[in-house]
Amino acid sequence: MTQRLALVTGVSGYIGGRLVPELLQAGFRVRAMARRPEALRDRPWIDDVEVVQADAADAEQVRAALAGVDVAYYLIHAMSSGSQFSSKDRRTARTFARASKAQGVGRLVYLGGLYPEGEELSTHLESRREVGEILLDSGVPTTVLRAAVILGSGSASFEMVRHLTERLPAMVCPKWVSNRIQPIAIRDVLRYLVGVADLPPEVSRVFDIGGPDVLTYLDMMRVYAEVAGLPKRHVLPVGVMSPRLSSHWVGTVTPVPKRIAQPLVESLVHEVVCQEHDIAQWVPDPEEGLIGYREAVALALQRIQEANVATRWSSASLPGAPSDPLPSDPGWSGGNLYVDDRTTVVEAPREVLWEVLEGIGGERGWYSWPTAWAVRGVLDRFSGGPGLRRGRRDPRSLMIGDAVDWWRVEERLPGELLRLRAEMRLPGLAWLDLRIESDPVGRTLFRQRALFHPKGLAGQAYWAAISPFHDVVFGGMQRNVARAAEALVRERRTGAPRGPVDSARRAGEAREGAHAA
């Protein structure tokens, strides 16, 4: 029997990246659609799928990607608000719907948001509702799954609950924390997404999906505190905080930036509880039942503690973030591309230096003048950027496409190159190029390049303003990375207790900070 072919869009995102291995395990052939296929190169499932390059807004490319497909998963969302995002969602959904009909796709599956009927919806939820209707009207049998808060290690909703609860033992919260919500564990969402591929053609409708528990957001924070072993949290709900103000507050306290927090918060203004559980007729509940909120939190925390987070909310680029690859055209040289280029000899093997480089950022930091990095991160957050709080998916290893604080991994060649593209708010485009080379006598060289392509006069002025600090920030970073690699070599030669990498980093940062002062 021929295996059915499933097309997955949004494969670089939180849901899509987890759905692919589930479909493979269920016996599907999988075709992954991506604008930049090279960005999927490090995914553990990449050798088991067919990858096609297509922009969801390009009708010809989408039709080609959908050729021969039995079930297509539409997991494309603009995680922001405003009419321009709604119109883009609308156009993209219509393009995909028409192409699916033309290519004879057997079923469309869309994961949308749960919302109450008869209420004025936020821009984000209204767009989700509209996309679902466009797909249902396509003439292709369609399943629209509507979910409220999705809980799993690395999900934006879970990160909001986690950081609000952990960082604020007492807080004043908006009144929406008392609204009822029916969260669902990511494992159950994936089970439903795979299961609905088997629905008969005559079933084309919306299904509400949710876990077994209906709670308030306040309940969710309190239960999280219990599961995480935190002291009781004290919350005072007030009625004076608008969704816009709330999203600023969430963006300040949690790693989730305002542009993603705002649509999530606007959704919480509504009570989102399932009105039916008809999905169980077609995808039966497991014998042990659906995963409850308490268990979902425990599972997510376990994955985080084990550093076993497959995808994260930051897996997809921020709306509006630059996606330009580092230019290699010689025409970019000279005045069009500023470069701070430094090279130092490191008394350590290449593999040890690579280990230090691949662990950079997140809790380990950036090996130079932490106060300067922290201040720049705060300024970036207040200007709408990601700041430094996104951290990392995994503390030890990286994949192409991973977020690392305000950077994103653009290229990764183990033992040779780690290239990061900036997603901070800048008057231009910026990269940090970390290379490992060898000199003629075989010594290990660490070459570090900070590159900046300015936009207009503001970009020129920005580079001129920060240039005096480069020796402290980038020079200090290079020196301390080298010291950390050399300390790691000494540790392994002597069998000393683990930890000198971070010790060398902290000592170096202290020296650089004193030098800056």
Image (cartoon, helix red, strand yellow):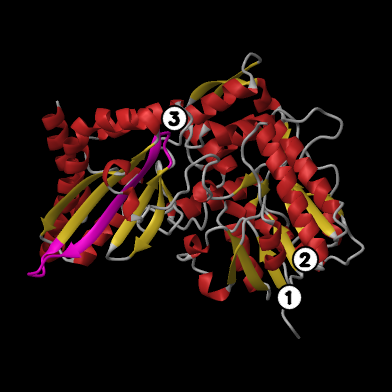
Q: Return the mark for residue 4.
A: 1
- In percent of width and height, residue 190 lies at 67, 59
Helix, strand or loop for disc 1: loop
- In percent of width and height, residue 451 lies at 30, 45
Q: Is residue 442 left or right of residue 75?
A: left
Say if mark 1 contacts mark 2, CB within 8 Å.
Answer: yes
Q: Residue at x 25, y 49 (%)?
A: 449
Q: Which residue is mark 3?
A: 381
Q: What is the three-letter code of the residue carrying label 2?
A: Ala
Say if mark 1 contacts mark 3, CB within 8 Å.
Answer: no
Q: Callout 2 environment at 10 Å: few (<14), some (14 to 19), or many (20+)?
A: many
Q: Quadrant of residue 42?
A: bottom left
Helix, strand or loop for disc 3: helix
Q: Is residue 192 above or below residue 472?
A: below
Q: Callout 3 environment at 10 Å: few (<14), some (14 to 19), or many (20+)?
A: many
Furthest residue toward right: 202
Q: Return the mark for residue 197.
A: 2
Q: Which residues are magenta?
A: 423-444
Q: Quadrant of residue 176?
A: top right
Say if mark 2 contacts mark 3, CB within 8 Å.
Answer: no
Q: Earlier in the sequence, mark 2 or mark 3?
A: 2
Mark 2 vs mark 3: give the one in front: 3
Q: What is the three-letter code of the residue carrying label 1?
A: Arg
Disc 1/disc 3 C-alpha distance (Å): 45 Å
- In percent of width and height, residue 48 lies at 56, 75
Q: Is residue 64 magenta?
A: no
Q: Earlier in the sequence, mark 1 or mark 3?
A: 1
Q: Is residue 442 magenta?
A: yes
Q: Callout 1 environment at 10 Å: few (<14), some (14 to 19), or many (20+)?
A: some
Q: Is residue 384 above or below residue 174?
A: below
Q: What is the three-letter code of the residue carrying label 3?
A: Arg
Residue 340 in view in this figure: yes
